[in-house]
Image (cartoon, rainbow, N blue to C red):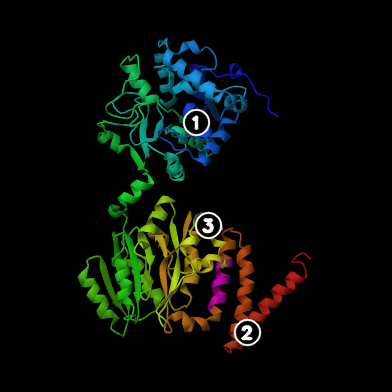
Amino acid sequence: MTKKIDLSEITVLPILESLSFVKMHGASVARFGDGEVDIMMGHSIPYQDYDEVLAGRLREILGRQSDEKLMVCLPDVFNNLERYNSNAQTFWKAHFAKYNDFYRDMCQSSWYGSTFISRPYIDLVDKSAAQTSFAALKELWRDRDIVIVEGETSCSGVGNDLFAAAKSISRIICPSRNAFAQYDLILEEVKRVPKESLVLLMLGPTAKVLAYDLMLQGYQAVDLGHIDSEYEWFQMKATHKIKLNHKHTAEFNYDEAIVFEKDSVYESQILAKITSSSERKENSMTSESVISIIIPVYNSSAYLRRCMKSLLNQTYQNFEIILINDGSTDGSGLLCEEYAESDQRIHLIHKENAGPSAARNRGIELASGDYITFVDSDDFVEPNYLERLYQTAKTNDADIAICNFNSFNEERQSFLFSITSEMFFEKVYTVQEWIDQESTPKNNLYLAFTLATFKLFKAELFDDVVFPVGRLREDDATVYKLYLKANKIAFINQGLYYYSQHATSLSHNSMKKDVEGMIRNAEERIALLVAMGYDASQHLISYQKRLEKCQQDAMASGQITLYQDISTKLDLIRHFKKNGGRDA
């Protein structure tokens, strides 16, 4: 059992010794103060609501012994509290009265750096050392490229010379409130900058987790919290905390009556701006991201109006529709012309019939959007289909966003709901995790894996990837290649797409006879997965099941040669397994 210590036994290095350690070792810094303790104890603070995951991460980092890679810091108030003014003394005495046991249980390391490397002025009675402290701080970034990760109201260094010694300044602007809710987006954005950069973090409790995770990635990331306000007070020789009128002020927690002075220099330094979920929802209608909707059309006059109505009524309106009339003979082409004349966002191409692959490939060539989605001309979608997929892709920084589908039986004119609201969930998959869903029947994941529809793809994924012309099961032969080019794949188990079931659809006719194509697609996929180093074990299991089904289908359709070829493959697999594998 860990022995509880007396608070006076907690060793915190002075400010200058802490800064010397950081400078000497190029260490990252995670600073803990009263706000982080509040979070760890289950409470919200003005700019960060309590988050269980955040609290756990903070406890993990605080429990770490400082070393040359990461200096963990605590306030230098466990001894000689009289160095601080009466307000500070009163605050810390009340804080320790409330959280004494927490510190005695958690703070077991042999030493800590000083949290007050970013608070070297205003609370001290003797402020004479502040100039030396600020000079030592500036040495951390002298002649270095710095990346400031801060809230949108912070404007650190704006209107002062705090970072004048830096070689260059870049900024990643984050939500000022509840930044941890966007943690993955923030981390991924910071990881885009060169590792030689010095990352300065002014982002409350979130900064501690960033400092730790960036350290693990090979960055030097220093959590500096309220340094800008301290430096402003130092420059004006303030004796108490004065509210700044042009940016956020430390501990004036509601940013009221501020006239920001964000000039062209500040704006030019911004590498990225990460907005909150509510801001993204508000801005979704005016986003610059265009979605290209590609619709192959072949003899679907009975269904095309329904399809187009569902798309034109989308809540997300920043789209283009590319209609590829693939040699229709039933009047579908005239309907397409009617729509193209009525809306400048609708583009129409007439071409000779060559099948859905050729039509989709032509649509991809013409697409000008940042994202691409495919909708079949006999299908239709919910009004928020585009918005939900787009939000899912952007929120999770995913290259592909996927929803689920329900069906509509044309003969009975009835919906068939396989995905209901009670089944809703969202999940972000790695490529390996998603390709393992290839044969998962639950929630129709095996169909969500295979089909090209009800997905939103980043357009760049289609560089060098085309649908195979002249082959059936073109989705099965193509979509997995796009997964292999993605970084993350986000899935929402929500039936936003409606698949039309009718007797004339392709899946009810020629595809059922394409037994050989079903096998070839699986073999091509397994070969590519193995060549790229992915674990293909789930695909090998489903491959054998696919062979067994195709063996029955080949016999039923009278494809005797194919039946014999499949039987040979199955015999080889069973013989191999029966004898314990290759080395038996």
Q: Position of residue 351 (x, y in %)?
A: 31, 78
- Residue marked by disc 3: 431
Instruction: Judge by depth and name the residue closer to the eye, 195 or 308.
Output: 308
Residue drawn at x 36%, y 21% as measured from the top left = 231
Report the magenta residues as a range. Answer: 517-526
Q: Amino acid at mark 3?
A: Val
Badge 1 vs badge 2, beta-carbon distance below 8 Å: no
Amino acid type, callout 2: Tyr
| Of pointers 1 and 3, the one earlier in the residue sequence | 1
Residue designated by label 1:
38
SS label for mark 3: helix
Q: Which mark is residue 26?
A: none
In the rendered image, the quadrant that contains the N terminus is top right
Look at the picture and state if 333 lies above or below 534: below
The reply to whether residue 85 is visible in this rendering is no
Q: Quadrant of the C terminus?
A: bottom right
Cα distance, mark 2 to mark 3?
34 Å
Q: Does residue 525 show up magenta in the picture?
A: yes
* 93 lies above or below 383: above
